[in-house]
Amino acid sequence: MTKLWGGRFTKPTNKLVEEYTSSIHFDQKLALQDIEGSIAHVEMLGACDIIQSNEVMEIKEGLLTIKEKVKKGDVTFSVEHEDIHMNIEKLLIDEIGPVGGKLHTGRSRNDQVATDMHLYLREKTKGLMELVEAVQSSLVEQAEQHVETILPGYTHLQRAQPVSFGHHLMAYFWMFERDKERLQDSLKRINWSPLGAAALAGTPYPIDRQMTSDALGFDQPYPNSLDAVSDRDFILEFLSISSIMITHISRLSEELILWGSQEFQFVELDDAFCTGSSIMPQKKNPDVPELLRGKTGRIYGHLMGLLTLLKGLPLAYNKDMQEDKEGMFDTVETLEGALSLLAPMLASMQVKGDQMKHAVNEDYSNATDIADYLAVKGMPFREAHEVIGKIVLYSIQQKKYLLDLTLEEYQDFSPLFEADIYEKLNPNQVVAARNSEGGTGFDQVHKQIQLAKEHLS
């Protein structure tokens, strides 16, 4: 028998079963984490006098040798040995002989794989937080340059009120800030150690789980061995956070696509982040934001897949749980790619302030300010709202905008109108006047940019 677990069996595994049940083609991504966990485990075995100190040294040196080979790409993993754990153990036995078989004392592949995934996801979560900050920095830099650049603000994709472009960009900063906070908070649950829970019930060996937990930088061991090997909440939480984050990326991408279209012409993405058409030479296609938008379904699917996988599983480990990794790996790689592209794409984006200003001057998004104007002069807001609705209808019929109407035309609707109405309707004044906390007023936008910088620092 070539299987490390083959003593119980009388015939070799069917080759189709071997191929179908093997996970080495994807879980080899955990090779370094598997070795890291194994080193902590064997050092603990030695400290607890479960194996001899010379055996500890021999196993540790063998693992370090394999680690270097893995880093250099000098290792060939085999389907015959099923998964990363059995492959590493087989490499170790080939490297140092039968003593390598003592490494597995007091543990199971069940707690081993859980430990590997905790280590992997902890590292990747911290890396994603750094990538999110790079995107946030690009948003802040663009926002700071365009505090007083004004564009139409939309509700229902209809022009609503003019806003600072810097203010609009900063809305995404705070979305990503919440994503980053969720990632940070998830580390509390990622950073538990399953190692030493063994298959499901613990082990009769006098192991020290706190020692391996500390050695691997975890906050604590799982208090319950069944929970330790069957918990995948930390992956579910990561996929949930990722689904929210890719939603934010997709919403921003959608706006970049709209703003860059011929119909809007508010921004232009750098050529380095666009592609052309094979048949239409005039085209400049926003392929990067389109793909970022398209990746949402992929990540949502991984979340739904794992939720569905886990919903009916009895405790503790089941082979179904082999399916927990590929979605996690793909989500990590999808987000790493998306965030790495988004930051420089935003930083290099050209903002067409004149085109935005032109759009603001040719709409009715300052209508609310006329209602506020009348309300300040004593007219009830609801009555003012009706008056302004009639003014807008009249303007549309006359093919005019609100700044084009004469004072006499305004006074036909209400004697409360005076010459200062034109100052109130100036888009810059409209935006600047919204100086309530968190508003689009220029002073408020400067304040939130300063607050954002404090968060980044």
Image (cartoon, rainbow, N blue to C red):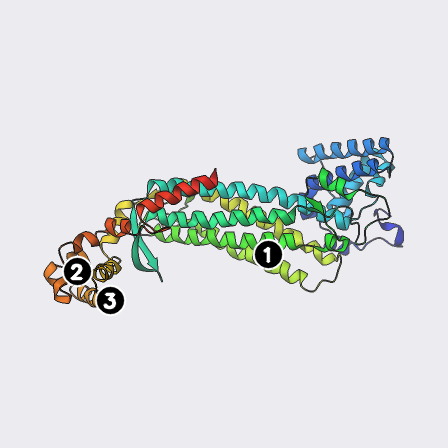
Query: What is the x, y in percent for residue 299?
Result: 55, 54
Q: Is residue 397 left or right of residue 15?
A: left
* Residue situated in front as seen by the camera: 202 or 271: 202
Q: Secondary structure at mark 2?
A: loop
The answer, for residue 35, to whether it is visible in the render is yes
Q: Which mark is residue 380?
A: 3
Q: Residues within 10 Å of mark 3 (few under 14, many from 20)?
A: few
Marks 2/3 in contact by CB < 8 Å: the verdict is no
Q: Amino acid at mark 2?
A: Lys
Q: CA distance from mark 1 to mark 3?
A: 53 Å
Residue at position x 72%, y 42% from top? Answer: 213
Query: Mark 2 — residue?
Result: 400
Q: Along the polypeptide, which appears first: circle 2 or circle 1?
A: 1
Residue at position x 17%, y 66% from top? Answer: 394
Q: Is residue 56 above or below residue 186?
A: above
The answer, for residue 344, to whether it is visible in the render is no
Q: Is residue 339 above or below residue 315?
A: above
Q: Is residue 98 left or right of residue 83?
A: right
Q: Is residue 368 left or right of residue 102?
A: left
Q: Along the polypeptide, which appears first: circle 1 or circle 3?
A: 1
Query: What is the x, y in percent for residue 250?
Result: 46, 53
Quadrant in the picture for residue 381: bottom left
Q: CA distance from mark 2 to mark 3?
A: 26 Å
Query: Mark 1 — residue?
Result: 302
- Total of numbered circles in the picture? 3
Query: What is the x, y in percent for residue 53?
Result: 85, 32
Q: Looking at the image, is mark 2 or mark 3 nearer the viewer?
A: 3
